[in-house]
């Protein structure tokens, strides 16, 4: 029951928050942008994806499918910063991953760079 309710809420939020998520060129990757992404990840992503992006957040066990492990799993829509940015803006249909289009473009770019950085720094990452 909890799982169905969570999926329904995520789907409703995605519909309500959907806006045009495409943007122009990505900003330059900087230490400040990565720090902003890290802070945003802690607030918006860690409860599902875990503090280190390993798909083991406190909510992960209740989700089906489970959240992606950024350190070992391939990213479904691609691992380039623009692809991650677009996924953040649109969400992932069929999962609890909502669209984060309510976040500013700058914050979504920061999150996208941070997710890629988590992956790049992991010795476990499948880099395909």
Image (cartoon, grey):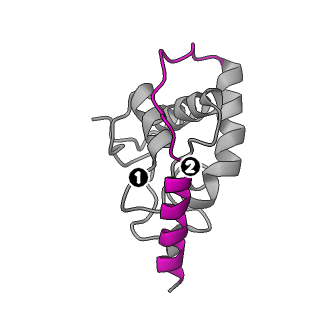
Residue beneath the point at 49% across and 78% down: 3
Where disc 1 sits, the SS reads loop
Q: Nearer the viewer, residue 10 or 80?
A: 10
Q: Are marks 2 and 1 in contact (CB under 8 Å)?
A: no
Where disc 2 sits, the SS reads helix
Where residue 15 appears, x then y in whole percent?
A: 49, 55
Q: Nearer the viewer, residue 96 or 13?
A: 13
Mark pair 2, 1: CA separation: 13 Å
Residue beneath the point at 39% across and 41% down: 125
Vertical comparison of 27 with 114: above or below: above
Residue furthest toward the bottom?
1
Report which quarter residue 126 is drawn in: top left
Badge 1 is on which residue? 92
Where residue 44 appears, x then y in whole percent?
A: 65, 50
Instruction: Please give the count of numbered marks on the rendered protein.
Output: 2
Of circles 2 and 1, which is in front?
2
Report which quarter residue 48 is drawn in: bottom right
Instruction: Verify whether residue 104 appears in magenta.
Output: no
Where residue 43 appears, x then y in whole percent?
A: 70, 49
Where residue 74 appears, x then y in whole percent?
A: 33, 44
State left or right for residue 100 relative to residue 82: right
Residue beneath the point at 50% across and 40% down: 89
Q: Callout 2 environment at 10 Å: few (<14), some (14 to 19), or many (20+)?
A: some
**Residue 105 image label:** none
State left or right for residue 13 relative to residue 64: right
Instruction: Verify whether residue 8 appears in magenta.
Output: yes
Badge 2 is on which residue? 17
Vertical comparison of 113 with 123: above or below: above
Q: Nearer the viewer, residue 126 or 37?
A: 37
Q: Nearer the viewer, residue 15 or 96?
A: 15
Magenta stretch: give its range. Answer: 2-30
């Amino acid at each position: 029951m909890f799982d169905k309710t969570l999926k329904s809420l995520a789907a409703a939020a995605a519909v309500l928050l959907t806006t045009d998520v495409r943007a122009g060129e990505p900003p330059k990757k900087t230490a400040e942008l990565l720090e902003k992404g890290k802070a945003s990840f802690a607030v918006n992503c860690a409860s599902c994806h875990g503090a280190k992006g390993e798909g083991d957040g406190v909510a992960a066990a209740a989700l089906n499918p489970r959240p992606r492990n950024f350190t070992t799993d391939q990213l479904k829509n691609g691992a380039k910063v623009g692809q991650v940015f677009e996924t953040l803006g649109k969400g992932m249909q069929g999962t609890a991953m909502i669209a984060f289009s309510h976040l500013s473009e700058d914050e979504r770019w920061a999150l996208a760079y941070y997710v890629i950085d988590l992956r790049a720094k992991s010795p476990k990452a499948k880099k395909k």
